[in-house]
Amino acid sequence: MKKEYFELHLQTAGFDTDILSAELHCAGCMGIYEKSDDDWIVYLPGDWTPEHHQNVVAVLQRLNPAFDVSELIIEKLPYQNWNAEWRKYFKPVQIGEKLWVRPPWENLPDGATGEAIIIDPQMAFGTGHHETTKLMIQLMQSLDLREKAILDLGTGSGILAIAARKLGAASVIGIDIDPEAIENAEHNLQLNKTNSVEVYVGNISYVVGQKFPVILANIQFHILEPIADALYECLQNEGKLLISGILATEAERFIGIFRRTGFTLESQSTLGEWSGILFTK
């Protein structure tokens, strides 16, 4: 008898999506695909009972008390379609003029130019499809990263660390608090045969005392705000701090906080609901 799986369609407006993703994986989901900023498909085991589904609903209501359960759509699908369903959403995507991001099972389109970054979207830690990742890579392409040492804070899948090396960075240190993210990053580094990148489980305290000419931080507001001073101390004089993960509606307040810390705003861009921000020291 063929196994089956459940596909849950979820509108994520009103959720902290980083916390939501972590909670869903802890609850046992097999994968998440972000169709857009606020539209997710969550894959659940086919042997789950109604009680399991109620546990997921309880998680959603705990994280967002205003969540309307009536908007939740759950479908049961044949398990043999799992790989096809999962993979069909991940196609090569071009970011700027220099880089493409593709999954291991896809080739670049005919005539494509630029470097390819291979990302295996195991746990949705950064696939190149999200606006914040695109904003970060666009900002990176606007700078000269050649021969620079980079700090990638919240490295996730390692996509920004790999992109930095493709753009000429001499070395990258990637840090993430999630051990599974670091495992995914190490896997992607191997897929890309990327050297001179070291990834560690930890937070910014891991690099206290070190100075970097460029720091990358695709992290949400509430995580970045308390470490503004630490970021300032880790950045070299005249260094560049590239940030996304900030909602456009919160960008002005965020920029004000970082200006008061000592940073100078160099540029700000918007894609969808998100801002990409470039500071100098």
Image: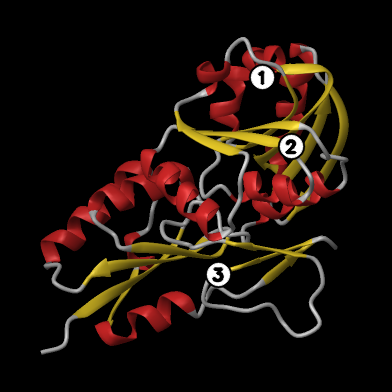
**Disc 1 residue crowd, few under 14, some 14–19, many 20+, Cα 10 Å:** many
Position of 177 with respect to 102 (left or right) is left
Q: Which mark is residue 170?
A: 2
Foreground: 174 or 223? Answer: 174
Q: Secondary structure at mark 3?
A: loop
- Please state the horizontal and vertical placement of residue 80, each as a whole percent of the image: 28, 86
Asked which quadrant contains residue 128, the reply is bottom right
- Please state the horizontal and vertical placement of residue 86, each as a whole percent of the image: 42, 75
Marks 3,2: beta carbons within 8 A: no
> Where 158 falls versus 84 (above or below)?
above
Q: Secondary structure at mark 1?
A: helix
Q: Which mark is residue 231?
A: 1
The residue that disc 3 covers is: 103
Position of 72 with respect to 121 (left or right) is left
> Where 50 falls versus 5 (above or below)?
above
**Disc 3 residue crowd, few under 14, some 14–19, many 20+, Cα 10 Å:** many
